[in-house]
Image (cartoon, rainbow, N blue to C red):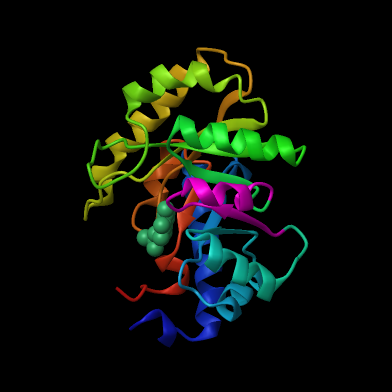
Amino acid sequence: MTHHDVPMTDIATNVQSVLQTIRDAAMQSGREPHTVQLVAATKYVEAERVRQAIAAGITICGENRLQEAQAKMEAIGTSPGLTWHFIGRVQRRKLKSMVGRFSVIHSIESLEHIEELHRRAEERQLQQSILLQVNIGNESTKGGFSASDLLKAIPGIVRFSHVKVDGLMAIPPREEDPEAMRPYFQKVKILAEEIDALHLPGVDMKELSMGMSNDYPIAIQEGATFVRVGAALFGARPQ
Ligand SMILES: *Cc1c(COP(=O)(O)O)cnc(C)c1O
């Protein structure tokens, strides 16, 4: 079944079921359910279906491409409590248009991007919340700082006062068995603790964006505060 075939009512059912799974995973690990937020990964999902998800309780939409996001933001309009996050690969020249439009940019992977964001946010007199993407499996196909590069780079980020570093984001290597993902989530958490121990101004590792449809309960057990879920809400995407 492609995502186009999933009846609309299923979206509401899926949203409720994912939210329940999030609550259960949080409680099982002794965490308050409200400390974990669901980011609906809405790439390739048309506005009408995103609207259905919002009606069913989604408050954060995570988009991968600026243009697709802009079109959907326009089609859907504002709605109380609704925010948009950017979770896709960042292009430097698009950062100007991204500032202020996304309440959190999850996928910042270079100092150059941070510098540009700072400049653009300063122009607009605002502060942009970001997460730093970590290439936790050291995969050549994936973006993000290596853990060691990040530890070296992060003291230099402090001077970019219009950028607020609120945590880390990771997309670990995909394993069929979600249990096999657990060590990667643990590594992200340890790295965040190492960074927090540096006590850098403007850097607070309060958010960990990790966990997708296949493994979000495990990610929550290991400390995720944002889980980015697409297929479990909207059905499989066209390849
Ligand atoms: C698509 C996407 C997700 C969601 O993946 P699913 O497996 O569909 O839940 C999460 N994070 C990022 C960065 C994505 O691009």
Is residue 207 in sight in this rendering? no
Depth check, front residue: 181 or 128: 128
- Image coordinates of residue 220 in percent, x first then y, are 45, 43
State left or right for residue 141 relative to residue 226: left
Depth check, front residue: 58 or 14: 58
- Region rendered in magenta: 82-100
- Image coordinates of residue 65 in percent, x first then y, are 49, 61
- Image coordinates of residue 195 in percent, x first then y, are 47, 19
Tell which quarter ligand 1 is in: bottom left
**Quick check: 7 above or below 115?**
below
- Count of numbered tags: 0
Picture quarter containing residue 184?
Answer: top left
**Quick check: 137 above or below 24?**
above
Is residue 113 in sight in this rendering? yes
* Residue 158 lies in the magenta-colored region: no
**Quick check: 237 above or below 213?**
below
Q: In the picture, which quadrant includes the N terminus?
A: bottom left
Taking the spot 25% from the left edge, 51% from the top edge, the residue there is 174
Taking the spot 57% from the left edge, 13% from the top edge, the residue there is 199
